[in-house]
Amino acid sequence: MKGVAVLGSTGSIGVSTLDVLARHPERYRVVTLTANTGVDKLYEQCLQFRPQYVAMADEASASALAQRLKSKGLRIEVDSGVAGLKSAAAHPDVDDVMAAIVGAAGLAPTLAAVRKGKRILLANKEALVVAGDLFMQEVTQHGAEVLPIDSEHNAVFQCMPENFRDGLARVGVERILLTASGGPFRTKPLAELESVTPEQACAHPNWDMGRKISVDSASMMNKGLEVIEARWLFDAKPDQIQVVVHPQSVIHSMVEYADGSVLAQLGNPDMRTPIAHALAWPERHGSGVGSLNLFDVARLDFEEPDTERFPCLRLAYEAVTAGGVAPAVLNAANEVAVERFLDGSISFPSIPRVIEQTLEKVTNGDEQSLEGLMAADREARGVAEQQVAARV
Ligand code: NAD
Ligand code: MG
């Protein structure tokens, strides 16, 4: 029986993870859960899964939850703040950690699990964008294991030879082909983008996701973050990672080999497939996802990405090529810009403008330490807020 921590259990990935875990009660025991402020949802999850320990980022939410659990007679330890999240990730009874907190906030708890040598099921791509080099060094140093949950990276992992960590050139891998749906604005007239609403941006054609990643998908920053994620997970050079727009979201990504072979992983667009894959790996078990009907799919289309329509993709390639703190700055500026788009402060096309201005202004920092990266993250957030206030 494996002990599992679900960090970000009340979110889209967290809920899908608990759905898969509940299908295999003989294999998994939920040991810890965490959330930000969603008391009602976390309380319900506590009733259903009876974890030993839960943590909420927000202190007031944690006290409210503790009260409710106590009056129900449930003996579950409740903690709060970053320290609580880290304890949930590093808990001694936990073997596998689902890292599904959104944003840079997921980095510290996920690193706490890495430092205990756990198996990390990584959905929180921002952790690798902010601290990829440091993160992967710590994984090696502490004997931890990272299995990708992001559907593209999980697909790439499934198409890679087992010994890919010996180096892509040595195992004959030429390129990683990351597929992208193109999001809800792939064909929208450019002039109309200025007035799109958060609701339109969050209405993804193929996937049902949290609001931040939904906006990232609409701007294609999600694919930019995924290029950086792939760079670290597979030790690939940025020019070995090609983005391919594939509107049906049936091929989740591909790997091209030196002999011309291209291997692809296909399936219905449902995150329970990569989640179940990573949980069971190297075995396989059910996920609740229905079988893929290729006759319904009928056709698979491919297009080159349009970087004029989607400047975020270009900015992400530039940041990963520049290296240093640039990816951390890109990520922080994007988190601010997305939040300000969602609260109505800026327009959708202002998102890349805020990010580009911030990248120009914040260029120095120490990317080899967590403190240095967090300082760059803080500085970038401040500068991005100034850009928002100046209405770039
Ligand atoms: P979501 O917004 O639905 O859920 C986020 C979770 O993190 C919630 O449980 C929330 O309570 C928690 N959280 C938010 N801010 C926090 C903070 N400051 N401190 C602690 N906890 C906090 O997001 P999601 O769509 O489930 O995405 C989670 C992660 O997985 C993101 O990094 C996203 O990029 C990645 N991902 C998601 C999908 C998807 O289909 N949803 C696919 C691939 C990758
Ligand atoms: Mg993805």
Image (cartoon, rainbow, N blue to C red):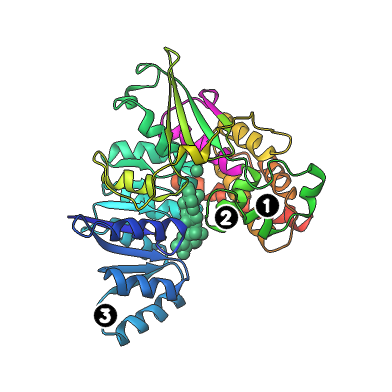
Rate crowding at label 1 as few (under 14), some (14 to 19) or many (20 or more) other CA atoms within 10 Å. Answer: many
Distance from Cα at disc 1 to Cα at disc 2: 17 Å
Q: Which residue is mark 1?
A: 384
Element marked by disc 2: helix
Front residue of 332/43: it is 43
Asked whether mark 1 and ligand 1 are closer than 8 Å, the reply comes as no
Residue that extends furthest to the bottom in the rendered view of this protein: 71
Front residue of 22/308: it is 22
Boundaries of the magenta span? 221-242
Q: Which residue is mark 2?
A: 212
Q: Is residue 210 left or right of residue 5?
A: right
The residue located at (28%, 58%) in the rendering is: 23
Front residue of 144/245: it is 245
Residue that extends furthest to the top in the rendered view of this protein: 259
Amino acid beneath label 2: Lys
Q: Which residue is mark 3?
A: 74
Verify whether residue 160 appears in magenta: no
Amino acid beneath label 3: Leu
Verify whether residue 227 appears in magenta: yes
Asked whether mark 2 and ligand 1 are closer than 8 Å, the reply comes as yes
Instruction: Find residue 51 and report its horizontal and vertical position in percent.
Output: 27, 68
Q: Is residue 260 left or right of residue 50?
A: right
Label 2 near label 3: C-beta < 8 Å?
A: no
